DNA sequence: GAGCAGCCTTGAACGTGTTCAAGTAGTTCT
DNA sequence: AGAACTACTTGAACACGTTCAAGGCTGCTC
């Protein structure tokens, strides 16, 4: 189980910490986030309730582990598509489908944890400073999606595209969270339809008529990330 | 205080209900959502804790009142701009600024309640069925923003624009929630920059080169709201 | 006016996330 | 060996959101 534990932990403690994470994620999957109590998580991990709070400041913090594990697996799952496809739309589609594939078993659970992610003061917010490493890792993946493609684009678009694609993926996840269709078919449909559109927008961004519009959007993005 | 109470309430009960809402919103503003306890809200309203639960199924439900009151005030605040301006960008800008103006005093509070809004199972989610009336009301406002403007657009764009603008406004609010700049200056900046870009996109949507792209996006929107 | 019915009100009790003072055990220092 | 130090562990206690059995109040019927 991939885990990014604090390095200064005793081997024994590291094991305890991992047991808590395992128990938590298992219970989250089984019962959902709210129904899984800290007492039960601790009990299943074989420790006291209070001890769980020695390793994790709050129940929400257990979700950061989920983020990290998910990202590592998403990275691996995207590899085949990125090695095979060269067309931007197809690369994007494959990467996003891999993302949703991996989240699948956690659908009910992820739905409730996303509520915590939306709170700006929460370290779980994808926009927060604490999540910056996770966000950077995601952005790097999308940079590879774009740069490894055969799509031609101006340097200004190329520089800003990864962040836009990350934002796009957040939108897809938001949609997925709310998607109650069988097998989340609607989310896959959304991906299948929007990925080519996104690629198309990148392509048309080179049109001279859109030069000024692209320039405005570029400046806007630079403003926002300042 | 505008309030959409259930109609079958005794006048006395209606008054009690209103007192609870007033106490709740005041405390939310003073201390924030989390720090305002149901016991304190009930106490300030002069009722027992349990009685608050006779009128509101949960603490979150008190936020629906906030939505309703805010929307009514936003509507009124947007009136002057909509009566004066004809250019789409200016109308959009004015409407969004009015939105953020009105939310101002609740910034800290709104930040924490948006976390509840993001949960799909919550009736507070702007995407939920329970919020549909509130969403429809918002969409109607944006329809007026677009239709009352001098902007020319195809019928297919005109039909779908209100929902897109509503989504855009949700994005602005999401940004605002995370905006910690003085006086939320960055949010106002975002509005000032993006409103003209949005108007510009509507304008360029008539370009023949973009016909097929616009068509794809149109079909996508129709898919999603199905 | 007595009884009745239904709306409204109460506060104690439950289970939750979280805290914390008090420990224990392993390691290092003298 | 003993002492001191640090890293870890405990479970009782706290405040919170929420529930509910019990009771009051109001206006109606006869």
Image (spheres, coloured by chain):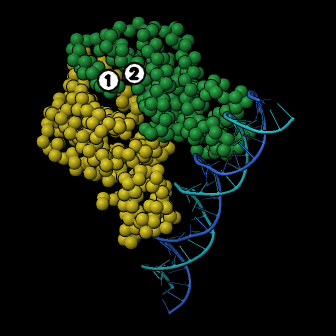
Chain colours: A yellow, B green, C cyan, D blue
Along the line of sight, which residue is nearer the eye, B89 or B156?
A: B156
Rate crowding at label 1 as few (under 14), some (14 to 19) or many (20 or more) other CA atoms within 10 Å: some
Along the line of sight, which residue is nearer the eye, B159 or A30?
A: A30
Residue B154 position, x and y percent, is: 31, 10
x 33%, y 14%: residue: B157
Residue A102 position, x and y percent, is: 28, 47
Q: Quadrant of residue B88?
A: top left
Q: Secondary structure at mark 1?
A: helix
Q: Secondary structure at mark 2?
A: helix
Visible residue check, residue A103: yes
Residue C25 position, x and y percent, is: 46, 79
Q: Which residue is mark 1?
A: B221
The answer to whether the residue labelled 2 contacts the one labelled 1, judged by CB atoms less than 8 Å apart, is yes
The chain to which mark 1 is attached is B
The chain to which mark 2 is attached is B
User: Quadrant location of the N terminus of chain B?
Assistant: top right
x 21%, y 25%: residue: A200
Visible residue check, residue B31: no
User: Quadrant location of the C terminus of chain B?
Assistant: top left
Q: Quadrant of residue A97?
A: top left
Judge from the rendering whether residue D29 lies leftward or rightward of residue C20; answer left or right. right
x 63%, y 45%: residue: B37
Q: Quadrant of residue B72?
A: top right
Q: Is residue B210 above or below residue B4?
A: above
x 41%, y 18%: residue: B162
**Count of picture labels:** 2
Disc on the earlier residue, 2 or 1: 2
Labelled disc at residue B163: 2
């Amino acid at each position: 189980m991939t885990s990014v534990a604090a390095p200064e932990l005793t081997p024994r403690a590291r094991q305890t910490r991992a047991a808590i994470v395992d128990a938590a994620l298992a219970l989250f999957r089984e019962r959902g986030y709210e129904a899984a109590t800290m007492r039960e998580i601790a009990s299943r991990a074989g420790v006291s309730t209070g001890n769980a709070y020695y390793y994790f400041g709050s129940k929400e913090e257990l979700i950061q582990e989920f983020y990290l594990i998910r990202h590592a697996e998403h990275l691996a799952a995207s590899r085949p598509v990125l090695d095979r496809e060269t067309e931007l739309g197809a690369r994007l589609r494959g990467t996003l489908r891999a993302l949703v594939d991996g989240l699948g078993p956690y659908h009910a659970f992820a739905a409730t944890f996303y509520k915590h992610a939306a709170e700006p003061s929460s370290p779980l917010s994808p926009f927060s400073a604490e999540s910056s490493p996770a966000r950077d890792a995601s952005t790097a993946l999308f940079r590879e999606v774009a740069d490894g493609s055969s799509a031609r684009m101006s340097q200004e678009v190329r520089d800003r595209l990864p962040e836009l694609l990350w934002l796009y993926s957040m939108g897809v996840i938001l949609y997925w969270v709310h998607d109650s269709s069988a097998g989340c078919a609607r989310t896959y449909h959304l991906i299948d339809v929007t990925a080519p559109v996104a690629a198309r927008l990148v392509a048309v961004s080179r049109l001279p008529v859109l030069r000024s519009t692209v320039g405005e959007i570029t400046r806007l993005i630079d403003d926002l990330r300042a």
